[in-house]
Structure formats: C-alpha cells, structure tokens
Amino acid sequence: MNRGITSTRDKILNLLIWISATLTIGILLWILIYILINGLGEISWEFLTSTSKEIENALWPMIVTTIYLIVITLLISTPIGICAAIYLVEYAKPGKIVNLIRFATESLAGIPSILYGLFGMTFFAIFDIGFSILSGAFTLSIMVLPNIIRTTEEALRAVPNDYREGSLGLGATKLRTIWHVVLPSALPGILTAVILNIGRIVGESAAVYYTVGMVPEVPESFLDSGRTLAVHMYLLAGEMVDFDTAYATATVLIIVILVINFIANTIGNLLNKQRKIS
C-alpha cells in the first residue's frame, strides 16, 4: 500500500518537474522567437557597422561601448570576487568577521541598481572621471561582486577535501594547492559566475544611464562617455518611440550575449582539457 502511494507521488512529482521545465523553456523560446521575428528584418550590415552620423540610430557605437564595459567590468570584479571567495572558504575561520563579510555581500546584492547608479554618478565625479566607461565599469563591478563571490564560494566548496589533503600530503604549500588543485577543479563553477554576470552587465540600464551616459558615439578611450545597447533600447522604446529599431537592438543584444557566452564556454572547455592532459 505504501509502495503504491510512494510510486504515485513520484510520478506526480516527475510530471510537475517536466511541466515546469517545459514551461520555462517554452517561455524563453517564445521571448527569443518574438524578438528575433520583429528584429531580424531591421538589421543590415550598414546598420551594424555605421555610426549615428552616417545612419540614424546605427548600432556600432553602442556595440563598442557595451563590449568595452563588459571587458573592463569583468577585469575589475572577477579577480576581486575570486580572491574574496578563496579567503572566505580556504583561510577565514568562522566568526564575526566572516559573518560581517557575508552580511555585507548579501546587502550589496539586494540594493536596487538605480542606487548604484546614483552612487557612481556622485562618487566617481570626485575623481574627475564623471560620465565615462570607466565610471560605469567601477559601478557595475560593485554590483556583480556579490554574485561572483557567492557562486565562487559554492564552486570551491564543491571541490572534495581529498584533493586538498592529497596535495598537502605530497608536500605542496596551501597556496600552491589552491592555485594548482582547487581552482582548476572549481573552474566550471567560476565560469558560470562570469557568464551569469555578463548577462547582468549587458542588460543593466539604470546604473549605466547615470554613470556611462548616453552619447551615441564610438568612445576613443575608457574615460569617454558612451551609450550601451540596453540604454539605447530604452531610449528608442521609451522616448523616441521607434519600436522597430528597438527590436533590432534587442536582437543584437541577444546575439552579443550568446557570442560572449560561447567564447567563455570554449575557453573553459580548453582549460579543462589542458588540466586533464597535465
């Protein structure tokens, strides 16, 4: 009797899981297909590679600004986040300091993005970098740092302690063990954190609006202002009321995210192959 009830519950649970997974994938595909259908027809080579002076609302300046912002933000936030996670997992002893760090991390993750934008606009103006890609990168680095720290922590904890004990037993130092054993094993989880934050960086508009600005020109340096694809799409849909170009911008935004994620996954796979060979 109990076995029959348990079997029925398992079937119901499996059915609910499949329905949830199918519904999630279906919604994602519906959004992507809807955007692509409305946006692909508006995209041309000239639209992608021209400036706003040559073709109205051309996307090349926005694409360059977005890529610059992604690269600089990841270069700033990723090393800091990984080092913080290593300290919390490998070195820190449970206590008030660790609890305070984790509380600060959780608090940073819960702050609305527009507050980050206001902070960046006022704080970085003190250092005379004002509206610039660098100002936006510093602001977004603070925003994505909690996600990198938490995800990297989980990846480091997932590495079996036998790996650490075996390396230390062979005479390796703790730092060498972390660098050559723990980090390579946790690399897939760390790359997941980086990929997730790429989507956050690309899709952010409020914080970028107040720090990077909205100048539709190709930035000559990181201290120049610019306009990202997300901000450009917001302006098109909200102020210029040009939904055709907004859909085209959204399509390019999706393609940029997919390309960057593909590159990140490819690099991760190559690093994993090299680790297995060595």
Image (tube, rainbow, N blue to C red):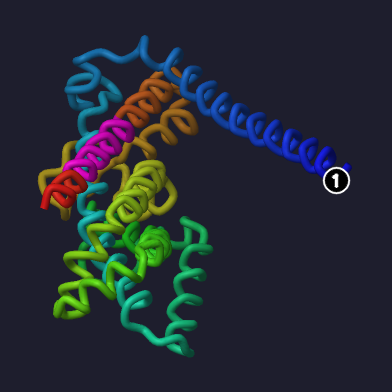
- Label 1, on which residue? 2
**Which residue occupies the foreground of this view, 82 or 175?**
175
Residue 263 colored magenta? yes
**Which residue occupies the foreground of this view, 217 or 257?**
257
Say which residue appears at 43% left-offset and 87% top-offset. 97
**Which residue occupies the foreground of this view, 271 or 199?**
271
- Badge 1 crowding class, 10 Å Cα cut-off, few under 14, some 14 to 19, many 20 or more, is few
Give the extent of the magenta segment. Answer: 256-270
Q: Residue furthest right?
A: 1
Q: Is residue 211 left or right of residue 17?
A: left
Q: Position of residue 133 (x, y in %)?
A: 23, 52
Find residue 122 and report its image quarter. bottom left
State which quarter of the image contains the N terminus.
top right
Q: Position of residue 56 (x, y in %)?
A: 28, 21
**Which residue occupies the foreground of this view, 88 or 198?**
88
Q: Is residue 21 left or right of residue 219?
A: right
Q: Position of residue 203 (x, y in %)?
A: 40, 42
Tell me the chief SS of the magenta region.
Answer: helix
